[in-house]
Image (spheres, helix red, strand yellow):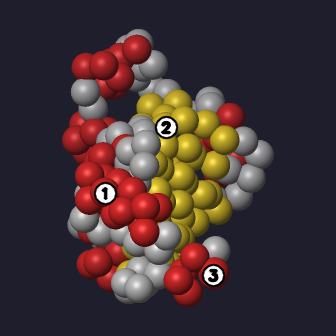
């Protein structure tokens, strides 16, 4: 990919830390709604129920699930999100913690979760998973899919790299 980046006339790299990294995580996760939650032993689709101001992602999970067992053995996780078909790609490594915090369960609870927790909000199997992002990488476009598409089309016609992408590391 360096050959593409060298032909790019625009700035297309920006590493993010602190509040900029948190904003990128929040925006991408809210657009994606769900992603892939990877433990050392498996990959499962999961939907974060909250991204807090520090960039932590919050999930509800069953205490007898395979991924809870994996986290108990090794709390290092990786999460992947894709905001749309053409943009908003994000992955990061993080540290997962499992708790039974009743206040957080109450905050995250919604009626549709009764599909998995049939006894409702007080189902004894409910656990909270908090994932604290450490570092990762994102790829996106700077001006939205329409502008990115137009720049790609013009670039193809004139034979010049006119990519509207932006990418970089994320560190919290």
Q: Residue at x 67, y 50 (%)?
A: 39
Q: Secondary structure at mark 1?
A: helix
Q: Are marks 2 and 1 in contact (CB under 8 Å)?
A: no
> Would residue 27 be seen by someone viewing this image from the given angle?
no
Q: Nearer the viewer, mark 2 or mark 1?
A: 1
Mark with earlier residue (2, 3): 3
Q: Are marks 2 and 3 in contact (CB under 8 Å)?
A: no
Q: Which residue is mark 2?
A: 46
> Would residue 117 be seen by someone viewing this image from the given angle?
yes
Q: Which residue is mark 3?
A: 2
Q: Residue at x 37, y 84 (%)?
A: 10
162 on left or right of 26: right
Q: Nearer the viewer, mark 3 or mark 1?
A: 1
Label 2 to label 3: alpha-carbon separation: 33 Å
Quadrant into which the C terminus falls: bottom left
Q: Which residue is mark 1?
A: 150
Percent position of residue 171, x then y: 46, 80
């Amino acid at each position: 990919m360096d050959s593409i980046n060298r032909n790019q006339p625009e700035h297309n790299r920006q590493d993010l830390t602190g509040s900029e990294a948190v904003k990128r995580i929040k925006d991408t996760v809210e657009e994606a709604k769900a992603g892939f939650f990877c433990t050392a032993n498996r990959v499962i689709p999961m939907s974060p129920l909250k991204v807090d101001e520090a960039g932590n992602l919050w999930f509800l999970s069953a205490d007898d699930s395979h991924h809870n067992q994996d986290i108990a053995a090794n709390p290092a996780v990786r999460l992947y999100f894709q905001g749309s078909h053409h943009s908003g790609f994000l992955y990061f490594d993080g540290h997962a913690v499992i708790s039974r915090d009743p206040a957080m369960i109450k905050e995250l609870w919604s009626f549709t979760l009764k599909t998995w927790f049939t006894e409702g909000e007080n189902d004894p199997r409910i656990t909270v998973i908090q994932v604290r992002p450490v570092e990762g990488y994102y790829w996106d476009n700077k001006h939205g899919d329409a502008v990115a598409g137009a720049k790609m089309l013009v670039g193809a016609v004139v034979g010049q790299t006119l990519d509207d992408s932006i990418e970089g590391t994320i560190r919290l």
